[in-house]
């Protein structure tokens, strides 16, 4: 039977990446022969351009000696998932592939570590703040496209109630933003932050105004951790869109950077007190 060629979607690339880690230093030709495949088929499966069945995931794991049934079943189930099944699927073609990949990675995460050096991170933005950030951006988009981006950012926030843990670092300087619509926008935003800080799975720290500017000067970071055996993913922002990596050294570097920033941020309780002080000040 001819194997159907498939688009290398994020899910298939992730499955292929995990299979590559399992294969390790085993010769690909030996693996392909034991799977009764040719080398091209194995290569394309590992790159995510061919679909692999759950049964073949289990067989390949057995061939390369993976003795971790829980991990094997996790990958087999991922291989079986239908493509483009998330809420974000209708937006394919309307937004960049990197952003679609990020949304899927974020949605599947078990834990999140988030830091933005300038603004309130997207998952904690109030509706008014979201609209302000998107409609007033220097890169002009049509009103219809802007409203679509607003809807997407709001929809992403459901992840807050799904993940086991969210550790988010918010710059205190972001609370000083002035908006033409008046202080009500920032009041709503601070209430949103306070509500999030009360969630049992959310650890929110403010980066104080007194922090040395070197902390966080390298840009926005999101580190996503997953259930065993999936590799962590780190995402960094840029004007050209986000970039994501599973490279262990790069992820480790960004984890150290995040930990250093968290180390100089205010403790959770103190951060909540400061947010309340800002809210009271805006009411005056």
Image: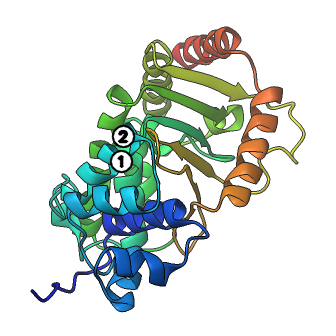
Q: Quadrant of residue 101?
A: bottom left
Q: Position of residue 196 (x, y in %)?
A: 45, 21
Q: Quadrant of residue 9?
A: bottom left
Above or below for 237 versus 259: below
- In the rendered structure, are the residues bearing label 1 and label 2 in contact, judged by CB atoms less than 8 Å apart? yes
Label 1 and label 2: CA atoms lie apart by 5 Å
> Where does label 2 land, which residue?
69
Q: Position of residue 118 (x, y in %)?
A: 66, 47
In the image, 255: left or right of 35? right
Q: What residue is rendered at 46% in x and 60% in y?
A: 18
Task: For mark 1, give the secondary structure.
Answer: helix
Q: Position of residue 143 (x, y in %)?
A: 26, 67
Let me know if residue 135 appears in the view: no
Bin the neighbour count of mark 1 within 10 Å (Cα to Cα): few under 14, some 14-19, many 20 and up: many
In the image, 247: left or right of 58? right
In the image, 205 versus 263, the foreground residue is 263
In the image, 214: left or right of 142? right
Q: What residue is rendered at 18% in x and 57% in y?
A: 80
Question: Residue 72's mark?
Answer: 1
In the image, 201 versus 9, the foreground residue is 9
The quarter of the image holding the N terminus is bottom left
Above or below for 199 versus 34: above
Q: How many marks?
A: 2
């Amino acid at each position: 039977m001819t194997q159907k060629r498939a688009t290398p979607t994020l899910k298939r690339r992730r499955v292929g990446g995990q299979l590559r880690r399992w294969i390790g230093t085993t010769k690909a030709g030996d693996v392909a022969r034991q799977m009764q495949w040719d080398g091209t088929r194995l290569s394309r499966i590992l790159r995510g351009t061919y679909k692999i069945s759950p049964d073949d995931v289990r067989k390949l794991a057995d061939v390369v000696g993976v003795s971790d049934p829980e991990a094997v079943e996790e990958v087999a189930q991922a291989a079986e998932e239908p493509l483009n099944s998330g809420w974000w699927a209708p937006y394919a073609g309307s937004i960049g592939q990197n952003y679609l990949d990020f949304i899927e990675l974020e949605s599947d995460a078990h834990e999140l570590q988030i830091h933005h050096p300038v603004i309130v991170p997207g998952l904690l933005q109030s509706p008014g703040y979201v609209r302000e950030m998107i409609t007033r951006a220097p890169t002009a988009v049509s009103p219809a496209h802007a409203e679509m981006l607003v809807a997407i950012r709001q929809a992403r926030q459901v992840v807050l109630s799904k993940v086991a843990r969210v550790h988010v670092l918010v710059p205190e300087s972001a609370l000083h933003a002035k908006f033409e619509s008046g202080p009500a926008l920032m009041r709503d935003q601070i209430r949103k932050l306070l509500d999030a800080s009360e969630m049992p799975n959310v650890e929110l720290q403010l980066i104080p105004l007194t922090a040395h500017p070197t902390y966080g000067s390298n840009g926005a970071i999101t580190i996503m951790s997953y259930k065993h055996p999936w590799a962590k993913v780190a995402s960094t922002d840029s004007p050209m869109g986000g970039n994501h990596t599973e490279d262990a050294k790069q992820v480790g570097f960004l984890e150290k950077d995040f930990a250093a920033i968290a180390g100089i941020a205010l403790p959770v309780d103190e951060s909540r007190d400061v947010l309340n002080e800002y809210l009271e000040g805006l009411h005056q």
